[in-house]
């Protein structure tokens, strides 16, 4: 992920509507990725974390939503829709 972020970091021409992160990822955890995104994009990209036992920390970091594990499609769809609507995007 780190190499991918360095070489393919989205810029203004990319149309990212939402980022879903997991806390446990191979090279860098979801908190580190979120921190890097917030440094580059501030609050312009809604971030959703896929984890349920770290919500307080996620709120402090500026996460916009949470998908509980184990991930259920209905719950994921509901949370994606909620976050996108709050960001003015909608589905």
Image (cartoon, helix red, strand yellow):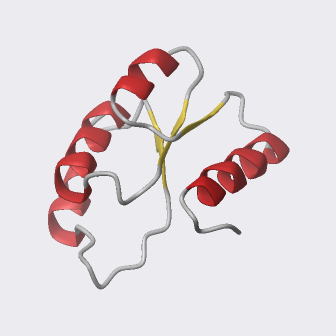
- 79 left or right, relative to 14: right
Q: Can residue 51 be seen here?
A: yes
Q: Residue at x 18, y 56 (%)?
A: 40
Q: Residue furthest right?
A: 74
Q: Position of residue 66 (x, y in %)?
A: 59, 34
Residue 13 in the image: above or below residue 50: below
Q: Nearer the viewer, residue 1 or 34?
A: 34
Q: Position of residue 31 (x, y in %)?
A: 32, 32
| Quadrant hosting residue 44 | bottom left
Q: Can residue 27 be seen here?
A: no
Q: Residue at x 23, y 71 (%)?
A: 8
The image shows a total of numbered marks equal to 0
Q: Residue at x 61, y 59 (%)?
A: 84
Please state, as top left, top right, bottom left or bottom right, where the C terminus lies in the image. bottom right
- 52 left or right, relative to 36: right
Q: Position of residue 17 (x, y in %)?
A: 49, 67
- 53 left or right, relative to 30: right
Q: Residue at x 31, y 41 (%)?
A: 34
Q: Position of residue 67 (x, y in %)?
A: 64, 36
Q: Nearer the viewer, residue 8 or 36?
A: 36
| Quadrant hosting residue 15 | bottom left
Q: Residue furthest bottom?
A: 13
């Amino acid at each position: 992920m780190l190499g991918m972020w360095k070489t393919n970091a989205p810029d203004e021409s990319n149309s990212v509507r939402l980022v879903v992160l997991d806390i446990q990822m191979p090279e860098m955890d979801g908190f580190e990725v979120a921190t890097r995104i917030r440094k580059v994009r501030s609050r312009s990209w809604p971030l959703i974390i896929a984890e349920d036992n770290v919500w307080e920390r996620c709120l402090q970091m500026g996460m916009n939503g949470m998908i509980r594990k184990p991930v259920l499609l209905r719950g994921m769809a509901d949370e994606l829709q909620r976050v996108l609507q709050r960001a003015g995007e909608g589905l």
